[in-house]
Amino acid sequence: MSFSCAAVAAVFVVILSGSHAVTGARVGGMILRQSSSSVQMFTEAPSFRNGAECAAGADGRVDIAMTLDANYLRGTMAAVLSILQHTACPESVAFHFLTAEDDDHGLAAALRASFPFLDLRMYRFDPSRVRGRISRSVRQELDQPLNYARVYLADTLPADVRRVTYLDSDVIVVDDIRTLTSVDLAGHVVAAPEYCHANFSNYFTDAFWTNPALNGTFRGRRPCYFNTGVMVMDVDKWRAGGYTHRVEEWMAVQKQRRIYHLGSLPPFLLVFAGHIRAVDHRWNQHGLGGDNVEGRCRGLHPGPISLLHWSGKGKPWLRLDARRPCSVDYLWAPYDLYRHSSPVIEEW
């Protein structure tokens, strides 16, 4: 049986019933399904212990924030494993997960079963807070309320979290995460790899660029693209500067005038582009999921790599399951904790 490239851009189906999930990839005219509880779907990771050089207590804590939902749980598991495996101080990493669910799907239980020693903290993100602010983008996944949870991190995390590193669920870290989390922000609110060679004008519509009252926001700064899937944030400065409201203001403009097409990224660019602390590109080898429409295969960019990011439509676990992986997907596979069993093939 042969599958077309279009079939590789499979729709990942998650049908939830109680604490059980039926997962699968839509391939051609069939759905490949696997059924088990969320906890039983993943193997237990090895235990990871701190090295002798690790500081004890809150002084040595590294705070990582991610979103958590059923569709991306497999990616989250791989990301967590990669972070713990490559840092010298795994027990010092605290994971803060924002979820739109009441966790009746067993997402936290699945994480705890695979990582019994994980410092795991769950927060409920209310989708109604952002649903009325979302405008339709080029891909349905980008329009999900949880995709906007990063805007509200400073409002959600407890006061003792003063710096946090936000990561998307489709990343793999192959370096010590502390190198990224300890970057000198030099007074900035956000740090991230910056890409000034990208055509910045493509991220906004003609309605934006032809309106001086709107595009004047970039006057006096050199705006460059950065990917919001990997960011270090000074939470105190974010709160003090009211940056949640600043991002929301641009989302309100978008609802009225349609000034961009790409989900939660452009309002971040409008507020922060040209005002971030640039981080080495090795910390976001992005675009490995291809473009946002087709998700075609892409190769690695030249240079050293500390973090691989499958941003774009194609996700490695879907392409691997469909047996049509891109070459870069084999770099993700060693971190996959999913229990593979014989799938049930159904016509649809």
Image (cartoon, grey):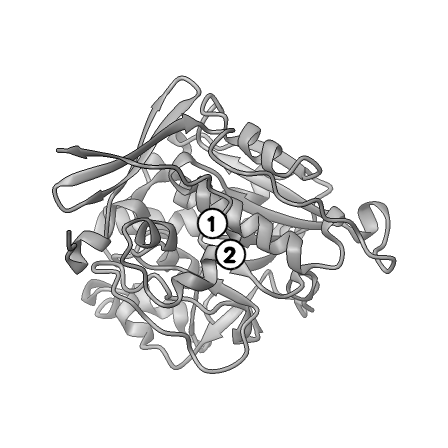
Q: Which residue is mark 2?
A: 334
Q: Position of residue 96 (x, y in %)?
A: 60, 41
CA separation, marks 2 and 1? 16 Å
Image coordinates of residue 55 in percent, x first then y, are: 85, 54
Work out whether residue 157 or residue 69 is closer to the camera in this orientation and state it.
69
Question: With respect to residue 85, does 19 lie above or below?
Answer: above
Q: Nearer the viewer, residue 183 or 13?
A: 13
> Can residue 237 be spotted in the picture?
no
Q: Earlier in the sequence, mark 2 or mark 1?
A: 1
Q: Residue at x 55, y 68 (%)?
A: 283
Q: Position of residue 333 (x, y in %)?
A: 46, 56
Q: Amino acid at mark 2?
A: Pro
The location of residue 5, given as percent across then percent down, is: 18, 60
Q: Quadrant of the C terminus?
A: top left
- According to the picture, the residue beneath numbered tag 1 turns out to be 169
Q: Secondary structure at mark 2?
A: helix
Residue 225 visible in rendering: yes
Residue 49 is left or right of residue 126, and the answer is: right
* Residue at image location 39% in from the left, 61% down from the top: 329
- Amino acid type shown at disc 1: Ser
Q: Would residue 168 be found to the left or right of residue 16 on screen? A: right
Q: Foreground residue, 311 or 142?
A: 311
Residue 90 higher or lower than 129, as above or below: below
